[in-house]
Image (cartoon, grey):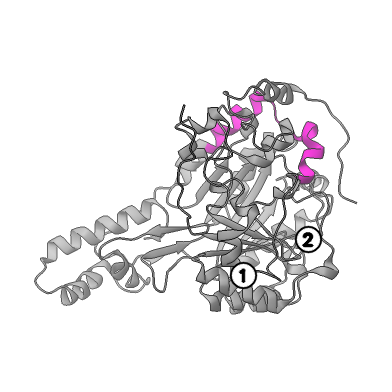
Amino acid sequence: MSEEVKSIGIDSTPRLMVGSRLHPTENLLLVPEGALQLSGPAKDILAMVDGKRTVSVIVDELLAQYAGAERHEIQQDVLALLGRMQQRGVIRG
Amino acid sequence: MEMTPTEYSLTRPSSLIAEVTHRCPLHCLYCSNPIELKRSDNELATEDWVRVFKQAAELGVLHLHLTGGEPLARPDLAQLIASGRAAGLYVNMITSGIGLTEKRLAELVEAGLEHIQLSFQDVEEASANHIAGTRAHAHKLALIPIIRKFPIALTLNLVIHRQNIDRLESFIQMAEQFAPERLEIAHVQYYGWALKNRELLMPTQDQVERSVVIVEAAKERLKGRIKLESVFPDYFGSYPKACVGGWGRQILLIDPIGQALPCHAAAVIPEMRFDTVRERSLAWIWRESAAFNRFRGDAWMSETCKTCPRKERDFGGCRCQAFQLTGDANAIDSVCTLSPDHTLMAQLRTKISEPLPIWRG
């Protein structure tokens, strides 16, 4: 019965769980029966998670936003955030 | 010993529970609503709720839970949803599904509904209908695929007790095939009507232990796909629960006639006076009202609770339960092993008989 959840890679097109959305003003992701406190660039990253952009496109766009940052570092941060969110079930691969 | 009360800081409420009506097509044996329901001719009007939702958002509330009774009994439900969204709230509806059609759901989703919680009484039809006091099970089942056509989150929930707990595993399997975002498995809490049926519903120790194993295994197996949340039966615990996240700390409940309560059982406590949203703003009620301040902080606590480090975690447990079980709303919650009345829990746990079920008329 057990079904492994596929982990997110650079070619994945992650999306937010149905019924979750970013709070319009606060650093929060609203989910059914709760809210996740976001820190650092998490809100900017999640704003691009739309089921259409691939992780690598998201990284490209972040690179353009944060001039001077290293691509591999951004990519690592994005994958780590998405992985944590996926574990919590609020991001689907 | 120094007995000055510890300062507490006022938190912001995160959830508004809006009991928009007490009318309900179901008559569940475990209903936690009060024994005396509010009459429909005195229900708040649409504009009252619109004002309340706006005030709630200004006060910092994030989530609006439309419940009842059955919220679908309100013809203005789509308007209520739209005004909740317009105020900036996340809108959830807790429903029996009775009265919900694809057309009505489309209107509600269009209005801004984001999450729907559909309750089940059992996985087996005859038993489910018996517990609900209504033939509702087949309709609820047929409704799930319809709900799944819409881009909203779905929670399926099951209240468990001695009469259905042995089918918990089959219920989880049934629920799983619909891939809901959440699954809620809650042991009955003995408040309101449920208290009348306590002997009928009380699980055995053995059933509770098996249910915990099943729930924990399912949580692990469903991780990342379905969020399973469970409510432990506190009669079987050693420490009290942080009831409603602490009195006047996280939730505000507005009943159908506009009274603001810190939790839905609060009216059982003697000498409680509830201010109404017809006369007062939500901000005033949250900050100033006697009802919300009554069990905030630790000034009301017994010395045992006041000097207990757990008070930061459980805020002194459940006041309604303390009153119901001991007759004193300031008493230590008898679930706690430090309560002089704790032995009562063992008596209630083992007092198992097969009395006749009592439904609401």
B21 horizontally vs B11: left or right: right
**Mark 2 belongs to which subunit?**
B
Is residue B209 highlighted in magenta?
A: yes
Task: Using the image as rendered, state which of residue B162 and residue B336 is in the foreground.
Answer: B336
User: Residue furthest toward the right?
Assistant: B361
Q: What residue span does the magenta drawing correspond to?
A: B192-215
Measured as percent of width and height from the top left, residue B342 is found at 64, 23
Measured as percent of width and height from the top left, residue B96 is found at 72, 59
The residue at which mark 2 appears reads as B22
Q: Tell me the crowding category of disc 2: few under 14, some 14 to 19, or many 20 or more residues within 10 angstroms, Cα based.
A: many
The residue at which mark 1 appears reads as B281
Is residue B125 highlighted in magenta?
A: no
B247 horizontally vs B76: left or right: left
- Which residue is depicted at the point 86% across and 46% down? B359
What is the spatial separation of the Cα atoms under label 1 and label 2, in whole angstroms? 23 Å
Q: Would you say residue A7 is visible in this rendering?
A: no
Q: Is residue B248 above or below residue B299?
A: below
Q: Which amino acid does label 1 sit on?
A: Ser
- Which residue is depicted at the point 59% across and 70% down? B149
- Which residue is depicted at the point 60% across and 78% down? B82
Q: Which quadrant would residue B105 be assigned to in this image?
A: bottom right
**Mark 1 belongs to which subunit?**
B
Q: In this view, does B110 lie above or below A36?
A: below
Measured as percent of width and height from the top left, residue B50 is found at 64, 76
B247 horizontally vs B259: left or right: left
Measured as percent of width and height from the top left, residue B132 is found at 79, 49
Confirm whether circles 1 and 2 share one chain.
Answer: yes
**Would you say the residues marked 1 and 2 are in contact, meaning their CB atoms lie under 8 Å apart?**
no
> Which secondary structure dominates the residues rendered in magenta?
helix
Q: Is mark 1 on a helix, strand or loop?
A: loop
